[in-house]
Image (tube, rainbow, N blue to C red):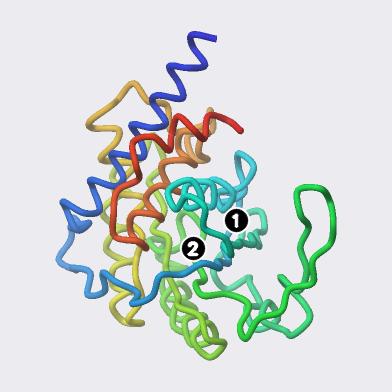
Amino acid sequence: MHAFRVHCRRLAVSGLIAGLFILGAAHAAPGPARPAVSDIGIQPKTFMFVGNSFMYYNNSMHNHFLDIVRTADKGATGYRGTSITMSGSGINWHDLESYFRPGGVASYSFTRDNKVVFNKFDKPFDVVIIQDCSQCPVHPQLKSVFHEYAKKQSEIIRKNGAAPVFLMTWAYEDEPSMTGGLAEEYTIAGNANKALVVPAGLAFANARAKQPGISLYMKDKRHPTLAGTYLAAATIYSAIYRKPVPASVGWRLSFM
């Protein structure tokens, strides 16, 4: 039990690191590119996460993100999220147009007592958070595909009334030099498409530097531990809502 509580406290600290990093450092990338977009202009309540196993580990990043949002915004209703992920997928694997098909994704959901609710809305999502594969933005054979589809997917998202947000992924644990390249390419793509970039990769590097005792990686040195997933979710929260995660959130979330 003692180890369990200590780990929960570390998760809370990870959230604070993410929030302070966003607000204080404005995710200054190591390369020449600087983010042009820092505010999506809305206070969103509905989210679609599009990616791969970096998102779906640990009962899915979108669930941790929604827990943070709901806990921070006490008593508020109407928050909803859907995760669409494929193992190993790149940004070009996803048929985003089909995800917005009427009567398809998010057309119904279930309450905590397992009752079906048929959702009615003018648009299914306010924000789409999308990532590429872990190497794709910096891979010499795939970098051009990343930028091509960052543009195509952003256009589809906007056409369907949502705001595109790119999730900058993190370096491999044993390849920390990836951080700068990933930050640069995601920032370039965000600027080119007037989209917000969530600097989760920089938050990972920052957390490792400030609190090296926190284990953010699974044994494969790529996928996130629960602490890593929570840190990425906290960074998304801070980037979208432009405020740090409340100190109490990490404790309240303790593996619910």
Q: Are marks 1 and 2 in contact (CB under 8 Å)?
A: yes
> Where residue 52 sits in the image (x, y, percent)?
60, 56
* Quarter of the figure with residue 150: bottom left
> Where residue 47 sits in the image (x, y, percent)?
55, 66
The C terminus, quarter of image: top right
Query: Mark 1 = which residue?
Result: 52
Q: Is residue 198 left or right of residue 32?
A: right
Which residue corresponds to the image point at 39% horizontal and 34% vertical from the top-left? 248
> Where residue 201 sits in the image (x, y, percent)?
35, 50
Give the mark nearer the N terminus: 1 vs 2. 1
Instruction: Between residue 21 and residue 192, name the one nearer to us.
Output: 21
> Which type of secondary structure does the marked residue at label 2 adopt?
loop
- Vertical comparison of 172 with 78: above or below: above
Query: Mark 2 = which residue?
Result: 131
> Where residue 228 sits in the image (x, y, percent)?
45, 38
Instruction: Between residue 239 and residue 197, name the one nearer to us.
Output: 239
* Residue at far top of view: 2
**Residue type beneath disc 1:** Asn
Instruction: Residue 37: tell me if it is visible.
Output: yes
* Residue at far right of view: 115
